[in-house]
Image (cartoon, coloured by chain):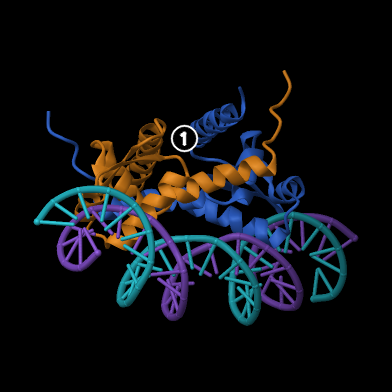
Chain colours: A blue, B orange, C purple, D cyan
Amino acid sequence: MAKKAPLPDSALELVARRFAVLAEPMRLRLIQALFDGEKPVNALVEITRGTQANISRHLQTLTHAHLLSRRKEGLQVFYAIADPTLMPLCELVCGSLEKQLTKQAGVMKR
Amino acid sequence: MAKKAPLPDSALELVARRFAVLAEPMRLRLIQALFDGEKPVNALVEITRGTQANISRHLQTLTHAHLLSRRKEGLQVFYAIADPTLMPLCELVCGSLEKQLTKQAGVMKR
DNA sequence: CAAGTATATGAGTATATGCTCATATAACAA
DNA sequence: TTGTTATATGAGCATATACTCATATACTTG
């Protein structure tokens, strides 16, 4: 059994870029809203209480990263989750953070 | 069955922060090197071909995020993976990216 | 104690990116 | 065509952070 070869720098940059796209609270809010199903921009603006311009930019970022899909219907544009790993990814991180916070809370007891 | 309540902003900021910590190629290199087992700083400097100062800062960032553990032994400081979700997290992202690239490659064929 | 080695950190710079405001584009309606 | 609505985008500003150089700290040895 050989050791696994390290990923080349170009691959690491792609991975880093993926993480960077997910590293904004507002984008996480959008993703979370879309876990609930496809929604038009105006609904997302309302749910996240962001400005239309800002939401539009974030949606573009997520779409370019192939995390969301985009569908035009008349005047509206509907976005939806396009990457099936988003949900497990978020759950993994949330689980890790919960465990950390639980452990830290334990320090205060006894 | 009620819909899941959205995470509060404070939680989303924690999640975003976690992703941000992982959004640097150099930090990913360090993590990858440590998947191989605990290592001292000088070994990590050599493996990643970074400067000592920069590596030290990145290790600090990862440790403060509770992703790495730190152990002093004489003059050396050994770092190791402390968060068991790191490996599956990276595998999830790599898998997603591979699938995306494969799909894009398919566009060129036929 | 002084000297040497491994690691950490203060200061400064450069770059990236999130945000806002204003405006542009696109699709539809009258 | 003109007007209206939904979304996208150009420009500019403010902030965060990755990097380097120099230096400080911590530990060991003589």
Q: Nearer the viewer, residue C22 or A6?
A: A6
Corner quadrant of residue C9 = bottom left
Residue beneath disc 1? A85
Q: Position of residue A87 (x, y in %)?
A: 53, 33
| Residue B13 falls left or right of residue A16 | right
Q: Residues within 10 Å of mark 1 (few under 14, many from 20)?
A: some
For the point 34% across and 56% down, the residue is B56
Q: Name above or below for residue C29 compared with residue B1.
A: below
For the point 74% across and 46% down, the residue is A43
Q: Nearer the viewer, residue C21 or B72?
A: B72
**Can the viewer see residue A105 in this picture?**
yes
Q: Position of residue C12 (x, y in %)?
A: 45, 80
Q: Nearer the viewer, residue A94 or A32?
A: A94
Q: Nearer the viewer, residue D16 or B100?
A: D16
For the point 68% across and 42% down, the residue is A39
Q: Position of residue B1 (x, y in %)?
A: 72, 18
| Residue A9 falls left or right of residue B9 | left
Q: Quadrant of the N terminus of chain A?
A: top left
Q: Position of residue A49 (x, y in %)?
A: 76, 51
**Can the viewer see residue B25 in this picture?**
no
- Secondary structure beneath dot 1 equals loop
Amino acid type of the residue tagged 1 in the rendering = Thr
Q: Quadrant of the C terminus of chain A?
A: top right
For the point 71% across and 26% down, the residue is B3
| Residue D22 falls left or right of residue B47 | right
